[in-house]
Amino acid sequence: MKELKTSKGTMGSLELSATLSITAKAKAMKAAGDDVLSLCAGEPDFDTPDHIKNAAIEALKRGETKYTPESGRPDLKEACAEKLMKENNIPSSPAQIVVGPGAKFSIFTAIAALCGPGDEVILGSPYWVSYPEMIKASGAKPVIIPCRAEDNYELNPDQLSAAVNQNTKLLILNSPSNPTGAVYRKETLEKIANLAASRNFMILSDEIYEKLTYDPKFPHASIASFSQEIADLTITVNGFSKAYSMTGWRLGYLSAPKWLTDRICALQSNTTSNPTTFAQFGAIAALKGDQTCVETMRQAFSKRRDLIYGLMSAIPGVKCIRPQGAFYIFCDISSFGLNSWDFSGKLLSETKTAVIPGQPFGAEGHIRLSYACSDQTIQKSVERIRNFCSGLK
């Protein structure tokens, strides 16, 4: 049989997610008996809270297994809009909410519904690995603006202004950030918002880590809360995976102007249809139930953040900023003379310690470490990294 090949169209050219592929390799080594320690996790190491699981279980028992509207159950959409209005001060309504199978897919559908060939989408690097691939899948062009550690990895408004042209359709923001853990300061967001209003481009604000912040000087701010004008230019993406440890449930949502959510609904109705019905009841319980579980997890991550930052920043040749949110620390390892793939590859093969290289995040010479793991794993992993680095000098 003649070998068939994928076309060179937008979808056929996508790269496999680097974070998922490396995590899978580490898991395979561990399954084979290797003493692998992984700092790759992109998900909390806590279980989903019982009241959320029980809500989904009861929904299953009641027979809640049929289709819902493609954009989600009306009561879940109402809960999402209420959350955004009360907690984030974002003007929203159930008609502006689309619930999807994960915040990742919500981002994908927003980009696909808004952008196409000839459009440009701006994002700062380091960036989440999937953003450029999603942009390319839409036929649009990613425009990358490098961000510096000394600027808290925030987009420089002057550089942003210079990058905007008649083809600019969208800017993607991610705060708190994966991979850097940086949280945008409100004054920077205000400058970006003013640019969006004056230069007429939209903003996709990925706020999936919003509940995981650790420094009072860096509180989370939603750019869509600044004014109705900015809200009309903003797609706010959020979800349940990180705050409620529901990664495998695959539920996320977005709030956007209704003219755009209508297009996103059309796309979702022709691809995934509705998000899993009984899982939506768990999402309602997450939003409306006791939030103590979120604070307990946040406090644990805050202590781990302090632990891993103290240990990594003490390694000669390693530079990193203190993360303000999410559960990642992004480290500059360029002084050792290896690119990020070689560094992480040698680290895994020689010490059985898995980290994510920075190149897929648009930041060569860096590695991303997750502290969504136990204190013991952090301590043992960093000790291996320290010994490995000392052997490179």
Image: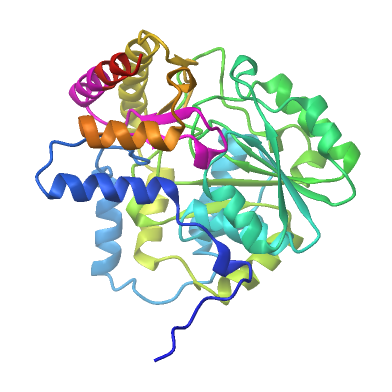
Which residue is at 33% across, 28% downward? 371
- Give the vertical position of 10 relative to 177 (above or below): below
- Residue 337: give x, y in percent of width and height: 45, 23
Residue lying furthest left: 33
Residue 133 placement (x, y as % from top left): 58, 55
Q: Residue at x 86, y 39 (%)?
A: 197
Judging from the image, the colouring scheme is rainbow
Vertical side of 258 occupied by 177: above or below: above
Q: Quadrant of the N terminus?
A: bottom left
Closer to us: 307 or 36: 36
Residue 270, percent from left and from top: 57, 77
User: Which residue appears at 36% of the width and 13% of the height?
Assistant: 393
For the point 47% across and 17% down, the residue is 335
> 358 or 70, which is in the foreground?
358
Q: How many marks?
A: 0
Q: Tell me the quarter of the picture where residue 192 sits.
A: top right
Relative placement, left or right, of 305 versus 8 is: left
- Residue 386 sits in quarter: top left
Q: Would residue 95 be seen by someone viewing this image from the given angle?
A: no
The image quadrant that residue 71 belongs to is bottom right
Nearer to me, 190 or 281? 190
Q: Is residue 316 magenta?
A: no
**Is 296 placed left or right of 317 in the picture?**
left
Residue 359 highlighted magenta (yes or no):
yes
One can see residue 252 in this view: yes
- Where residue 100 appears, as percent x and y from the top left, is 51, 60
Question: Closest to the observer: 329 or 291?
Answer: 329
Q: Which residues are magenta?
A: 355-384
Left or right for 362, reference 46: right
